[in-house]
Structure formats: structure tokens, C-alpha cells
Amino acid sequence: MTQPVSAARAAAAALAALGEGPPVCVVLVLEGAAAGSRLLCFEDRIEGTLGEPDLDAAATALARTALHTGERGLQRPELPGAPALFLEPVSPPDHLVVVGAGHIGVPLAALGAQLGFEVTVLDDRPEFATPDRFPADVQVRRVDFAGDPFVGVTIDQRTYLALVTRGHAWDFDCLRLLLQREVRPRYIGMIGSRRRVRAAFGALLGAGIARERLALLRAPIGLDIGAETPFEIALSIAAELVLTRRGGTARPLTEKEQVLARLLPDAPES
């Protein structure tokens, strides 16, 4: 028989998810006879019950979506008489690794921190890899690009990597190391002109990196918003990070919703 989930067990699962534990979505019934009941939805299993199999199944589907999107809040399953549920997805923060501490790396790191990423900046130049150039919650590491700059940096499925280095050589070395790894990061993007990107792709193919691995790379990096200044370029990259994390179309919302055309009646003729 499925055991109920206590408040203490839910809190423990949430705390574990913020550290090394698996992500979890805590589902709480807010009304009705089952008010106060909880269900814990992990990526590979569930714990607890909300009292009815159909409600458990519907709540689990909503919780799995919340685990993917990160959206918390009130939900009501599409079941007759279903109670309101509160969904609280909890997971470790996504990790943004900014490779390059130059004029784009600085605003990108600041935007990443504001977006809730755990941010690490890597650079080999002592005058650039200094904490005082970045927000206090950004980790800055001086590394050796001639060796492996990712030594000691956790790279997993929650890692987003933005290569904004100062030259082709660093792009090639960093990408070769990243694309040879077994673990696939959530996002790898590289800044550069069409010529720079083509040169990097050609060199990587020549070094034996498979074409399907190269397809993982976002290059040039960012969304097309006509960015010109360093901050605008950083903003276009940050927008692509959010798009990857949350999903979406990147279309203007006014174009997507078409409120005037679809939802408002035609204006009366004069």
C-alpha cells in the first residue's frame, strides 16, 4: 500500500534536490477531502498518493511538465471535480559556464546570475579573470587554455556553455574537449562570424569529431535581435539560454497571440 508523504519527507526531498539529490516536484492538494495530501514526482518514480489513481496519474503528468519547465504554481487537473493542486518543482540551479571574461563575458555572466544560473567564468588572462569585474555570486577562475580549462568544473546535463573567447585557437581547443566528452551538456554555443564558425567546424571535422556531435553546437550564438553592442549581444545569448531552458518559439508574443485579429470584433464601419 502506498504510504502518505509527510511534510517532513517533502521538505527533505526538496532540500536534497537543491544539492546532489534528484530533482523533485512536490504536489500538494489544496482543497477537498484530500487537502494536505502530497505526492512527490521524481524523474523516474513517484512517492505518495492523492487518494485516487486517476488524480495521481493526472497530477504526475502535470508534475513531469513542471520538472521540465521549472514553473511552480496552482494547477487544476482536467478531471471532473478535481481539486486545486500546488506544484513546486525543485532542482539544483542550472550551471552557466562563460568561457571568456572579455567585453561580452562580463554582461553575460551578470545576466546569467540574474536569471538564476550558477555562473562560472573561465579566462587565462590575470587582468580579466578577477572577481571584482563580476557580481559577487559569480565564480571566476583563471585557467590554462593550452591545457584543459575545464579541470574542476562540473559539466553535466544541467550545464550551459557559452564560448565567447578572443580567438579561433581557444574555440577549437575548448570545443574539442567538450565534444569528446561522454556527458552531453544542455547547451553549447560559440560566438563568431560565419567565417570563424566555418573555420572552427572544419578544424573539428578534421580532428575526427563526428558531424552529429558538431550538430549540438549553437554557432553563431544567440537569437537574431539585431544586437550590436556587447550588452545587446549578451542579451541575445541570454535569450537563447532561456529559450533552451523553458521552451518557446522566439516569436514576438503580439504575432503569436494575434489578439486584435482573433479575439476582438471588427471595428464598426464609420
Image (tube, rainbow, N blue to C red):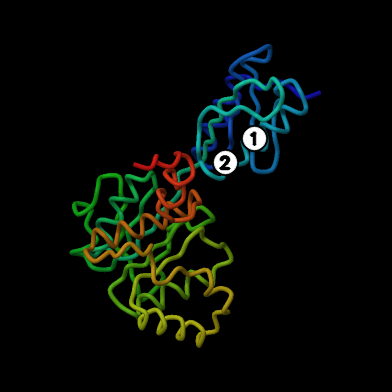
Report whether 1 appears left or right of 95. right
Q: Is residue 177 above or below residue 31?
A: below
Report whether 192 appears left or right of 6. left
User: Do the numbered discs 2 and 1 sit on residues whose CB atoms are within 8 Å?
Assistant: yes
Residue 102, given in percent of the width and then of the height, sits at 24, 65
Look at the numbered disc 2 and give the secondary structure of its residue.
helix
Look at the numbered disc 1 and give the secondary structure of its residue.
strand
Amino acid carrying label 1: it is: Cys
Q: Quadrant of residue 227?
A: bottom left
Q: Quadrant of residue 104?
A: bottom left
Residue situated in front as seen by the camera: 236 or 28: 236
Residue 215, given in percent of the width and then of the height, sits at 53, 72
Residue 86, given in percent of the width and then of the height, sits at 56, 26
Farthest bottom residue in view: 206
Q: Is residue 232 above or below residue 177?
A: above
Which residue lies under the disc numbered 1?
Answer: 41
Residue 186, given in percent of the width and then of the height, sits at 51, 58
Farthest front residue in view: 270
Amino acid carrying label 2: it is: Leu
**Residue located at (35% from left, 70% from top):** 191
Which residue lies under the disc numbered 2?
Answer: 67
Question: Which label is found at residue 126?
Answer: none
